[in-house]
Image (cartoon, rainbow, N blue to C red):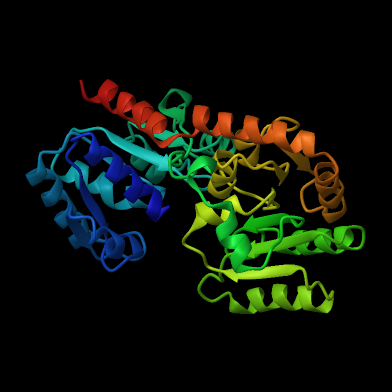
Amino acid sequence: MEMITLTFIKKLLERNIRVELLCIEESRMHIEANNMGIIIHSVKAAGYFHPFTTIRISNILKRGSYDLVHTQASKDLWLLVPALKLRKIDIPLFLTKQVGSFIVKKDLLHKFLYNRVTKAFAISTIIKNNLIETTPLSIDKIELLYNAIDTNRFDPDKTDRKKLRKEYNLTNSNLVLGMIARFTPGKGHEEFIEAAEILSAKYEHLKFLIVGEASRGEDVYANKIKQMAADKKLSNIIFTGFRSDTPDVLAAIDIFIFPSHAEAFGIALAEALSMGIPSVCANADGVLDVAVDGETSLLFQNKNSRDLADKIELLINDESKRKKMSIASRKRAVKMFDINLIMDQTIKFYEQETK
């Protein structure tokens, strides 16, 4: 979520739109933004109620004479709405909803907060429905606006397929299946390994890449997954750890696997589509906005490793199908999720509310 915010800032700056960042002091976003050469206003805030921080933010907003405020987290409303109200700053407030909530927020206090929101952007249909169900926002205030990817960076014609394959001694005869996700419960690592076990008993030319690292405090889970692969004696599974060269990683993969149990959108999946990789995905939540069953991907029953293996096997045995999906995947990514397209749509909403 932090990186999406910084990507949007970069794109706005490229269009000569003045942007300043308000963020939590010493947060990951703050650290990364320090290298961007932009004006940063950092504040301290933990929890929900911060009278002194609210006053400071209100002063920042008043002095800055901004045209609008756009936040990527609903929790920020607890700071922003009081700050805007305090100095009677009448500018649009946009909210992008990145993750769903199980808490219904239709009490008087939340009505006070959400009534100040000009537009809420939902990154997928599941998130849009969640906003309707859990917040007091009226439907006319909610817009579907997908997360964006850089289809120029994630372009199969601009990446080196051999780089990673050479690094891990993968031959031309190897068919490589890969997933990219941090090690945390719910990302589907278990189903990926169980499917690998099923398929490895039938096919000797398969290699499986698991890309990513453990989130803070989740090393135990990561070790559990690695031990699971060891216990099954799956020597054809490669744990790459964290990789910053994601386009080159994807270029080495023949079939992308996205087994996440519940994803609001699925940036990694959209990036795989942009790279023209056929995919097999869990039929759940935000995946349904990204993948098209039978066109860009094959959908399997969520959390069902046997069905995952069956769907992968269909692609293993049908190179023609993989090639058709590859073309369709790239086409869909460029048409639906390209960063410049999403920025055009975002700026259009900005302009509608600031006239």
Q: Quadrant of the C terminus?
A: top left
* Residue at the limit of the structure toward the right, as seen here: 202
Q: Nearer the viewer, residue 87 or 186?
A: 186
Q: Nearer the viewer, residue 248 or 62?
A: 248
Q: How many marks?
A: 0
* Residue at the limit of the structure toward the left, as seen here: 63
In this image, 198 relative to 1: left or right? Answer: right
In this image, 194 relative to 48: left or right? Answer: right
Residue at 64 percent of width and 30 percent of height: 328
Residue at 73 percent of width and 41 percent of height: 283
Quarter of the image holding residue 119? top left
Residue at 36 percent of width and 64 percent of height: 47
Q: Locate residue 111, reporting x and y percent.
A: 39, 39
Residue 4 visible to the viewer: yes
Residue 136 visible to the viewer: no
In this image, 223 relative to 246: left or right? Answer: right
Q: Is residue 250 shown above or below 110?
A: below
Q: Is residue 178 shown above or below 278?
A: below
* Residue at the limit of the structure toward the front, as seen here: 172
Q: Is residue 352 shown above or below 108?
A: above
Q: Locate residue 224, reporting x and y percent.
A: 71, 77
Q: Locate residue 336, reporting x and y percent.
A: 51, 29
Q: Locate residue 170, reporting x and y percent.
A: 69, 63
Q: Nearer the viewer, residue 295 or 139?
A: 295
Q: Nearer the viewer, residue 128 or 136?
A: 128
